Amino acid sequence: MTALLDIRGLTTEFRVNGHWHAAIQDVNLSLAANETLAVVGESGSGKSVTALSALRLLPQAGARIARGEILFEGRDLAKLSQRQMAKVRGDEIAMIFQEPMTSLNPTMTVGDQIAEVLMIHRGMSHGAALKEARDLLDEVRVPDPGRRITEYPHQFSGGMRQRAMIAIALACRPKVLLADEPTTALDVTVQHQVLTLLDDLKRERGMGVIFITHNLGVVAQIADRVAVMYAGEIVETADCTRLFANPAHPYTEALLRAMPRVDRRADTLEPIPGSVPSITARPAGCHFAPRCGYVRPECGHHPALGPISGAGGSDHQARCILRAKAEEAAWTV
Amino acid sequence: MTRYIIRRLLAAIPTLLAMLTMVFVLVRLVPGDAAMAMLGDQASEVSLAALRAKLGLDQPIGVQYLAFLRDMLGGNFGVSMSSGRPVLEEVARVLPYTLELTASAILIGAIFGLPLGMVAALRRNAWPDYLSRILSLTGLSFPGFVSGILMLLAFAVYLRWFPVMSTASDNFVDHIRNLALPALNLGLIMTAYITRVTRSSMLNVLGEDYIRTARAKGVPPRRLILRHGLRNALIPVVTVVGLYFGTLIGNSVLVEMVFTRPGLGKLILGALQARDYTLLQGLMVIFASFVILVNILTDLIYAVVDPRVSYS
Ligand SMILES: Nc1ncnc2c1ncn2[C@@H]1O[C@H](COP(=O)(O)OP(=O)(O)OP(=O)(O)O)[C@@H](O)[C@H]1O
Ligand code: SF4
Ligand SMILES: [Mg+2]
């Protein structure tokens, strides 16, 4: 499969107390059409920064893409001006966010907010765009869309707002959707509905979706492939089924052990001790070493992301000196 | 929306009553009373008593209070003791001048303050921001009448661009020339004020999630700032300007005196000098009612700008 979006060696830095620190380092991700790539990791591991960098939505001051390419259909988005980038956003690549309560403009009707994308990118008239907005709300299964387009976000529930966000994102039929924890703020049943909706829409439209989450249950439900991030780096990437069956990186293993599952009692959950280091305090060698149960002296050298032995034909990579012994280190239920 | 308006009007009733009670008490706390003020210190007890009876001042305080409320709520402000003309007429004669002055000040403040505040927010910590912050700090730290006197000296006495003393005139050009300096004086203070509020409010809004959403939609910069940023940033600006209105009228009274411009200022000064009780009392009530009215108006504008208000 040829990649639709190909992120290569992406490094994004923030200025903290006058010094530039990398929030994400040397991130490689590639996404094909009709594929869902999940990016997982604890809070602070750099998932959002990766997505925001890809759409060039970082804060204008104090943030920079230091290295790397963001290839979209052969074009390097990292080199585009903000003006050229605005043409790509919302049209060819769209993004939805975690906070449905605050991500919509409170002083604009939901209909106008959907219509706006169509007016900007398709040059539609307000009337035509509103009609289309109504159809889009219908498509994301918001009941009574004709009335709903005239309402304001505060009149929508959280789940309905997230549907409206999806309608905005999908209005121009983007080829790539970046979804940054779109269901995290929703309660479980609504979460499930929104996930199903996203999955259906992805299939119907053949979109590529990068789905950011820290919930492995969600990953299992929707992802084709998974990239695990830790402290600004991708530490493991594999097919979804393979990752759950044969995690190669100790961090992935730990994440799986910390994951609540229906077939396991809650008191057997093992939360990962410690926390993700801040961007100003990352260890020199393997970033995970301070929390790793397998740590050994060689871990003082920063490991590279490399293929797993015994992975067969699948593209399974991990960033750990133990990766050659992946089969032994594999997590068992 | 209609229900919202009715609710706001009903909510103003207690405020109005509290204000009237305060005026009633204040007037009675002043040493001496209305009868003494009218007849002077030398008046005989007999004539004082006669006048008190005529004014109802010999009645029990409760009766006086109710009569006062009835008069004030009915718009019956009595007759000015110094001029003999109805208080309402006196006020109505000069009110347009004061309103014209305050309205021009707000207009000037909005025309300059909104763009300045926005540019400051967008160029945060760059020279336009520093410049606007220095300007607004200067504008806010000068009392209105001090900068008024300075402007008067510079533009009217020294440069002679504008008249030193305002005179009533039917000629439009003269009228504007008379208005220019005092309006500019108050307008600059208002500009400083609006710049500051707009800057901080815009900075807040620019950090909001929905601005990021708009950027992710590909909204071009100009539309992003005006349609998504300014509209939301205006909400606090409207509130603050509304709250400032009472102070603004107070300032305009001072500025009117500096520029010897007809208006409430001159009327208040005259009433004080003449110890014109009825006029002062009427002025206080009318002034305060006006501020209450402006607050209601502010709430209504607020509801128009922010859809969340009228629905909740
Ligand atoms: N504007 C910023 N300035 C400085 N540091 C930042 C900024 N934005 C993010 N960071 C840092 O970059 C790191 C990665 O943050 P990011 O938001 O990508 O995490 P995340 O994986 O999305 O976590 P979460 O699950 O909490 O959303 C964090 O350590 C964060 O503190
Ligand atoms: S490199 Fe060493 S410290 Fe890092 S994950 Fe592998 S074993 Fe653990
Ligand atoms: Mg995040």
Image (cartoon, coloured by chain):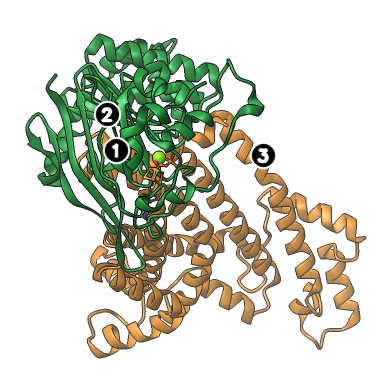
Chain colours: A green, B orange
Quadrant of residue A90 within the rendered picture? top left
Q: Chain of mark 2?
A: A
- Considering only vertical position in the picture, is A37 above or below B90? above
Q: Indicate the position of residue B131 as horizontal and vertical percent values.
A: 28, 73
Task: Name the residue type under label 3.
Answer: Leu
Q: Which residue ends up furthest to the bottom in the rendered image?
A: B158
Per the image, label 3 sits on a secondary structure element best described as helix
Q: Chain of mark 1?
A: A
Which residue shows up at 51% across the image and 23% down it?
Answer: A157
Q: Indicate the position of residue A48 as horizontal and vertical percent values.
A: 35, 40
Q: Which residue is mark 2?
A: A309
Mark 2 vs 3: CB contact within 8 A: no
Q: Indicate the position of residue A249 as horizontal and vertical percent values.
A: 38, 35
Q: Is residue A299 left or right of residue B162?
A: right
- In primary-sequence order, the first of circles 2 and 1 is 1
Q: Chain of mark 3?
A: B
Q: Is residue B265 left or right of residue A314?
A: right
